[in-house]
Image (tube, rainbow, N blue to C red):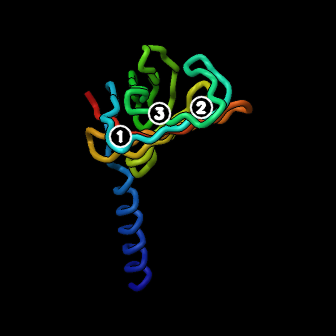
Amino acid sequence: MRLALGLAALGAGVFAASAAFAADPPDLVGTWKATGESYASVRLGDDNDHHPEYATPSYGEPADAWSMVIREQKGRAFSGAAVSPKGAEEKIVGVISFDGDHLIIAGDEAGLFGEVLDGNRIEFCFQDHEDDRAGVSCYVAAKE
């Protein structure tokens, strides 16, 4: 009897744990544009296709934020493009964490991560760290 109760309790715990991961991931497909809310950015170093050389730290403005365009999502995995304010695109791929709240994104020369704040807002953070330059930015984006 004690064994049966123990197995029942274990089964209930496993079911509850699996149910926590059973929720559908958030729908990210669409265009995410910076709101200007909580924007911070700084770059230093050599130029690239999108920025001039910065011999001293250069602090960005909200108008410098890139948009994220998620074109396809399959379960927790997604792909699309990061789009500069001038319209240049860099392909991105990413995944949503099991908790449905965190994003890990990779681009050609940089990494991004994010946190889903609610169904219509995500905080995106970007990190560029090549041998000759560095840059970071974080901002809140809203789904259009």
Identity of the amino acid at label 1?
Answer: Val
- Do residues under tags 1 and 3 come within 8 Å of each other at their CB atoms? no
Q: CA distance from mark 2 to mark 1?
A: 18 Å
Q: Secondary structure at mark 2?
A: strand
The location of residue 115, given as percent across then percent down, is 40, 46
Q: Nearer the viewer, mark 1 or mark 3?
A: 3
Which tag, 3 or 2, sits closer to the chain's start? 3
The location of residue 81, given as percent across then percent down, is 46, 22
Q: Secondary structure at mark 3?
A: loop
Viewer-nearest residue: 123 or 137: 137
- x 28%, y 46%: residue: 118
Q: Secondary structure at mark 1?
A: strand
Density class for disc 2 (Cα within 10 Å; few <14, some 14-19, many ≥20) is some
The location of residue 108, given as percent across then percent down, is 60, 24
- x 35%, y 49%: residue: 22
Which tag, 2 or 1, sits closer to the chain's start? 2
Identity of the amino acid at label 3?
Answer: Gly
Q: Which residue is mark 3?
A: 60
Q: Which residue is mark 2?
A: 110
Q: Please determine whether, in this image, residue 91 is positioned above or below residue 15.
A: above
Which tag, 1 or 3, sits closer to the chain's start? 3
Q: Which mark is residue 57?
A: none
**Quarter that holds the N terminus:** bottom left
Q: Which mark is residue 140?
A: 1
Q: CA distance from mark 1 to mark 3?
A: 14 Å
Q: CA distance from mark 3 to mark 2?
A: 17 Å
Density class for disc 1 (Cα within 10 Å; few <14, some 14-19, many ≥20) is many
